[in-house]
Image (tube, helix red, strand yellow):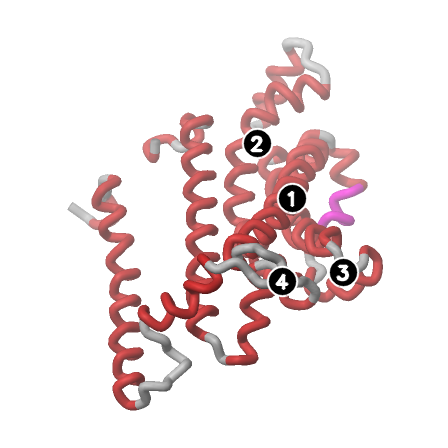
Amino acid sequence: MRWVNRRIRRGNRILLGAIPILLLVLLYLVIAAGRHAANPNDKILPLPGGMAEGMSALLFQPDQLSGQLIFWADTFASLQRLGMGLGISTLSALLVGLLLGVLPPVRATFGPLVTGIAVIPPIALLPILFIAFGLGETAKVALIVIGIAPFMIRDVAAHIAALPREQIVKAQTLGASSWQLMLRVALPQAMPRLIQAVRLSLGPAWVFLISAEAIASDIGLGYRIFLVRRYLSMDIILPYVAWIALLAIAMDMLLTWASRRLFSWAHGEEH
């Protein structure tokens, strides 16, 4: 059987996906052990014991000033900002994407504006956001929204605009208005695409969040990473980076599960 025709079972997919990750971890441990054998005080590639020791205070000991467990406070603050940014972007993509995709006059009027915003590097707008909204939460959330919402809007609108013309004609033949077309024909078919757009936007959303926290924040995962870098505290930076990766993977898996559970028809044989 040709490789292109092979179908991998779910258990085998998990095993195959874990192999490269385990190899990378093993490679890191070998290199780190070699560096520590040559220099026991090496701080660039800490061993697991060193990372556990460095993280223990952040995980289990309350901060003397705030009384909070720093690691969990950082996680909550970052997830709160990320959740608000993703929520606003998703709602914007759904509403604006429907209008642009279904209504050609709206697409002709506002499509170029959305495209123009989408091609602007969001990081370049960060100083403007801080000047306009201050150094509080609004600017950080706004950076996430500006960074991912235009892409999501364009993706959803293009998907709706590409729906078979026969569906539109048949719905109009049955007396459907423009709003009924939007809600009963376009919306159900846009939902799986919207979830896919959110999944693809997770990576950029984390980038914009970490960037904003690194520049102007006093709490958050990105703030902590950039705070301890001046001390070369890789025993804290690496666990934080790994934790961000785990959070992103968990969010992606949750979105995938929700899409397959709610819209199994959109996944075909993958269900």
Viewer-side label of 1, 4 = 4
Given residues 122 and 230, the one toward you in this image is 230
Sequence-earlier tag: 2 or 4: 4
SS class, disc 1 = helix
The residue singled out by tag 4 in the image is 65
The residue singled out by tag 3 in the image is 135
Q: Amino acid at mark 2?
A: Ala
Furthest-bottom residue in this view = 38
Q: CA distance from mark 1 to mark 4?
A: 27 Å
Residue at figure coordinates x 33%, y 32% from the top left: 269
Q: Report the predominant secondary structure element of the magenta stretch.
A: helix
Q: CA distance from mark 1 to mark 2?
A: 21 Å
The residue singled out by tag 2 in the image is 190
Residue at figure coordinates x 51%, y 33% from the top left: 192
Sequence-earlier tag: 1 or 2: 1
Viewer-side label of 1, 2 = 1
Sequence-earlier tag: 4 or 3: 4
Residue at figure coordinates x 74%, y 44% from the top left: 111
Furthest-front residue in this view = 64
Q: Is residue 135 left or right of residue 266?
A: right
Viewer-side label of 2, 3 = 3
Sequence-earlier tag: 1 or 4: 4
Q: Position of residue 183 (x, y in %)?
A: 64, 21
